[in-house]
Image (spheres, coloured by chain):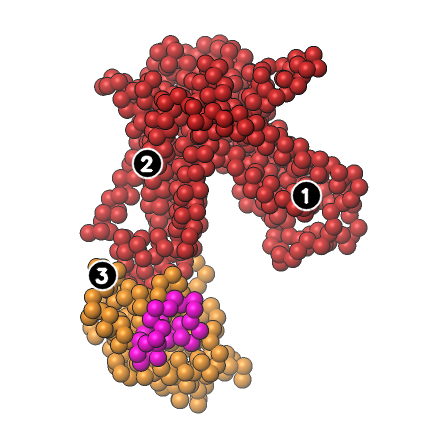
Amino acid sequence: MARSAVSLTLVGVTAVLGLLLIGPLAAVIWRADQGLTALDIEAVRFTLWQAALSASLSVALAVPLARALYRRRFYGRGAIISLLGAPFLLPAIVAVLALLSVFGRVGLLAQGAAMLGLTLPSIYGAMGVILAHVFLNMPFAVRLLLLGWQSIPSERFRLAQSLGFGPPALFLHIELPMLRLVAPGAVMAIFMICLSSFAVALTLGGGPRATTVELSIYQALRFDFNLGAAAALGLLQSTLCLAALGLAALLPMQHGFGIGLDRALALGPPKGWRAYADFAGIFCATVFLLLPLGVLFYTGLSGIGSLPWVIWPAAARSVGVALCAAFLACFAALILAKASLRYGRFYEGVAMLPLATSSLVLGTGLFLIIHPFFSPARAALSVTILTNGFLSLPFAFRILLPDLRRLYADYGHQMTLYDLGPWAAFRFVIWPRMRPAIGFALGVTAAISMGDLGVITLFANADGTTLPMMIARLLGAYKMQEAASAALLLVLLSFGLFWLFDSREGKDA
Amino acid sequence: MLKVENLRLEQSDFSLDATFSANAGERLAILGPSGAGKSSLLAALGGFLAPTSGRILWEGQDLTNLPPAKRPISFLFQDQNLFAHLSVEDNLWLALSAGKGRKTPEQQEKILAALEPMGLSAYGARRPGSLSGGQAARAALAMVLLRARPILLLDEPFSALGPGLKQEMLTLVQEVAAQTQALVLLVTHQPQDAIDFATLTLFLDQGHASCPQETGAFFAEPSAILKSYLGK
């Protein structure tokens, strides 16, 4: 009985995920009855250009930083590496506000330049979009490359030392082969993130020279209410996402450095100007990441108590949406991870389906489906929960799968032998043993959902907004102080939710 | 009686054919070099590995297509016989109840009765991590006692213990088997284990299971293959 319920749930989850991908896409294809304009072509060009440049710059800057962090040991190194993980959970709208507080028209740099009688170029437009993407993704690239450096067996470095390699030869024969394998994957991953990054384009982009395809979809739906144009653009965006996904699949996934014996690195890091360059790089990157956030924190803190009252219901809605989306994503991820262990990789593919679409494409398709029947604004929160849960599913799945695989390798036979049903298996084995991983997955997905500014922009009216959307509105109205305070509230809530799940579930495990 | 009829196991890198029988109350050692398929044979008997062909019968009942939990079998694996996050008593309760309902006074009584002969009455509330290797092995054996199935499969469960402790555990298994009249199948690659423990010995080599022989005779008149295995 219980087992057939689990099988039904699996079929249900797979069907819902399939429908969520195919339904909106079919609606988009069905309504895409307009040709592309010159502006649309320009949006495609800009989308690809900014994504390629953002990804290349992020990785290019990350290479020396990751190497410096790998080979230097100093007080605070661990804290900096942890800090590099934070932007992944930082809502994009907050990153934009933080950058504006330093690089904006009335930001810290502009004020300093004004005192010297200089005028800085505007952050709005292509430069701002790329700056924000580098700010959000360079730390991610550093973490990926740092893993690459750590995967080089220390025996290789010992061999290099015994052969008398200097830093150039070391780079050429040991580090460059690793980078050739790791860097293209990092560039591709960031390219895909930037391809569908909407919040940055919405707040810093715009105009004919800095409009992405996703921003064009938003403008076609919200400003022109041109469903045909929105659908055509949605189809275009889907094609771009699928092409990028196909390209990513061709890249090597495995490192080919062999297995080392995990001996400590005996080779001392190079001294002289290289040491200065390493520490200068680490210092600049830390300032680049911390200064905008510090200024935002300082600006926002004073106004957090006097935020307009409409902020608080929006914050409550955001928390509610984040919690529901996180539970949905983790539930589906756990069901699919178990199915992939039992039935093979088909279900891994199912869990990765959301990567083939984007928030705005999904939103456009659902808008087209819902619109003939009732006002999309009425479904704003439910659709946001569903899409946020759907889009964060791959993250939850990737977090849970390795732990579930280990658990079944250790205890799978016992669970079968004792005939534990699904509920007993979850209650007595899966939950107690996987609490840290489930907590982490819930924390990550809740934080991602909390900061999402995507599909809600297409559906919500003035009454049903979430906190990120409220911040975007304040930003649009140039209410910078209120926007900074609301952004600080969003950061506190996002990281608070993450901490709540991650630390609570980590206990006793 | 356990009857294994023309059982064939095929995996990507090896195949195994086995035909043999053994009666309740006997202790059968399955001996052979690494990679011969000893654990695979046991996994097939336990229901964790589907045979390509052949049948497994117990007292005339065909077990071949039954799931592991429905077979009249207890199984001790090489490791992870106890859930590390549960107390010894909770481990035993899970083996007894499949996690259904709450622990009843009758179940608690049975659990204590299984722990007592293992000398673990005072250790029920402990987690496996806080037990010594010998105590953990005895706790796992208490689960076997509690489940009271007529066939016990042992896949080198005591290989991590020292020689003295291992001998003690094998003696304990003998006592449990004698008490319950269970048929015990022990996988080992140590000839001395077979000599000390088993009434019958079956040798696996190059994808073929020999007919079980009385252990004394098996080692007194070793075949050419066994001589080669023993390095004689």
Chain at tag 3:
B
Closer to viewer: mark 3 or mark 1 = 3
Camera-nearest residue between A433 and B151: A433
Closer to viewer: mark 2 or mark 1 = 2
Camera-nearest residue between A385 and A237: A385
Residue type pointed to by label 1: Glu
- Note whether A495 is above or below A460 in the view shown: below
Residue B151 position within the rendered picture, expressed as x and y whole percent measured from the top left: 28, 74
Chain at tag 2:
A
Q: Which SS class for mark 3?
A: loop
Give the labeled residue for mark 1. A175
The CA span between labels 2 and 3 is 31 Å
Spot the orange chain and give its letter. Answer: B
The residue sitting at 50% across, 28% down in the picture is A301
The CA span between labels 3 and 1 is 58 Å
Q: Is residue B116 left or right of residue A192?
A: left
- Magenta residue span: B115-142
Give the labeled residue for mark 3. B102
Q: Which quarter of the rendering shows the C terminus of chain B?
A: bottom right
In the rendering, which numbered label is found on residue A324? 2
Residue type pointed to by label 3: Arg
Question: Mark 2–mark 3 contact, CB under 8 Å?
Answer: no
Do marks 3 and 1 both belong to one polypeptide chain? Answer: no
Q: Is residue A234 left or right of residue A150?
A: left
Residue type pointed to by label 2: Cys
Q: Is residue A281 visible?
A: yes
Spot the red chain and give its letter. Answer: A
As for residue B218 lying within the magenta part, the answer is: no
